[in-house]
Image (tube, grey):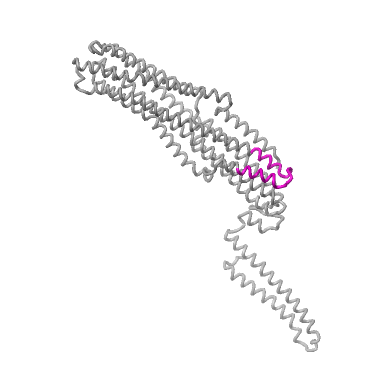
Amino acid sequence: MRVPQDLSTTIACTGITLIGYYGSFIIRDLEPLSLSRAAAIRTEQVYTVAFNNSRNKLLSALLASSFLWQSNLLCLAADNGTILKSPLLVAASQAPDSFVLTGGTSITPDQAQEKVDQLSKDILLKEIELERYNLHYTQEVAVQGRWKGWRYGGLQIANNGLGLAGAIIGTSYRGARLNDAAKVKPAIQEQANFIPEIGAWIGAGAAAMEFGINGYHDMIARRHGFSPTAAMHKVEGLKNEIDRMLAERDAITKIENASPSFALHAQIDAAEGKVLRDLRDQSLLEFDRFHVGARRLIGFQQMQYFLDLSKYTSNALGYEFGALSLHLHRRRYNGNAGALFIVSGALTMTAPMISRYFGKAVGSITEHRIKPIVGDAEHANIAALETDLASLDKLFKESGLSPDSIQRTIDREGIYGIHQKAFSDEIRAGQKKRADSKLSATQNVGAGLYVGGSKIASGVLFSIVGFHHEYNTKTPRANHVTNDDLFAGSVIGIPATAFSILDTLRIQVRGELKRKHLEKKGMLPAQLITLRLQQLDEQEHRIKGIKP
């Protein structure tokens, strides 16, 4: 039968029909009163009986009307899809000792408690899976080999060492002939260009090699399922599963709270739900830090290696033109050499800043892409987790419940504390690492400005004697000015190149000492990751052993 669309019409029709139907019984009950006056003596008794019968039938009519009104209301609501969707609404319409969830599953408050425990375990296991993925991600992405720093630093020391040798040769040879420039022998002076040129090609090759190694590691990570897109899809899937179970757990906790005998349990379960949500937020934020940090580091390093390749290639070509000017007796090539030295110096000055800002830009783009996945967790902080854990512990102490009745929740609380400590330690380590990175970046910018500025000054001196028409001839004045300027260029290069060698050596030695110190304390990133993975495995086995 089709339900009328107008609810008021349905109620009116039903009421009129029932009143008319039951009214006939009332009239029929009263008819005997008018048939015989002889029965007057029984009037009072008859009216009494008739009134009682009529009253009962009117009450039945009203109850039937109410029943039909409720039935039509529910049918119309079901037809419009406005009810029977929320577990709480369905539960509210049931008897206090039985509730029906979406899908027709019946549950009592006592069963709700066990269901909440099971969901808490499942949520915690999913969060452990998310944390484990975070750690494997940081192991696979932006890999920094054990000898990466020494390999690249060592090759740059060789590069600068050969450059220093060439500068010393040029300074000593030209310096001895400042008063008699005609005695400068091109064949000997060519060595002052060939030696640093070899060093510059070594530096360029080292930059290209490290650029390729980073690309290779990135390719391997993508094959293992840790590409940016695959990682975000994986984390988003885990987050959606956790959110679904959290929503179901919240609904069942409210069902549990409907029974006064389980109200205290429901309060504890609600407090535990906040802790579970905090852990989810911290896991998402950890992935955000790992993912954004990895992409930022790769962007920074790749741009740095590209700029190093460019500046060392420019430097090598500059030395090649300097050697050609001597070999072919064409001083104009000194101008080409000077222009390339200026380019190399400018790249040296700006490379630390360009690579740093490029890395930040890559990180910002990555953070924008991941923002929909992190969602409301973006504004979470570790203090909220600490506060909610303290509130849960306070409820344990003040609830007055038997420890046996909440033992499973108490067991999980210990695991929550381990997670909170791991997140706090990781955040503090990240903050210290960022502070060290800022200091290193500032030092690198300062060093780049000094070394690059010296290179530009040397390039300007080469350009003067190369491009100025008065010094392209072989007159005594041209010989004298050329020898003096190129001598000055070599002198400028000596302290700057020596500084580069010492600064590179300082960075590597300092890094190695720090690494040894952390290794002894078991605080190296690789050690901490291994330890956390072991803890997660132990926690997983422990949780699976907590039977609801």
Q: Residue at x 33, y 24 (%)?
A: 454
Asked which quadrant contains residue 361, the reply is top left
Q: Which x, y percent locates residue 145?
A: 50, 25
Q: Of residues 10 and 85, which is closer to you in this image?
A: 85
Q: Which x, y percent locates residue 170?
A: 31, 15
Q: Residue at x 21, y 23 (%)?
A: 468
Q: Which x, y percent locates residue 534?
A: 62, 31
Asked which quadrant contains residue 198, the reply is top left
Asked which quadrant contains residue 489, the reply is top left
The quadrant of the image that shows the C terminus is: top right
Q: Which residues are magenta?
A: 387-415
446 relative position to 285: left or right = left
What secondary structure is the stretch in magenta mostly built from?
Answer: helix
Q: Is residue 223 magenta?
A: no
34 relative position to 326: left or right = right
Q: Of residues 538 and 20, which is closer to you in this image?
A: 538
207 relative position to 100: left or right = left
Q: Of residues 358 and 42, which is closer to you in this image?
A: 358
Q: Is residue 111 above or below residue 524?
A: below
Q: How many marks?
A: 0
The quadrant of the image that shows the N terminus is: bottom right
Q: Which x, y percent locates residue 398?
A: 69, 46
Q: Of residues 504 and 397, which is closer to you in this image?
A: 397
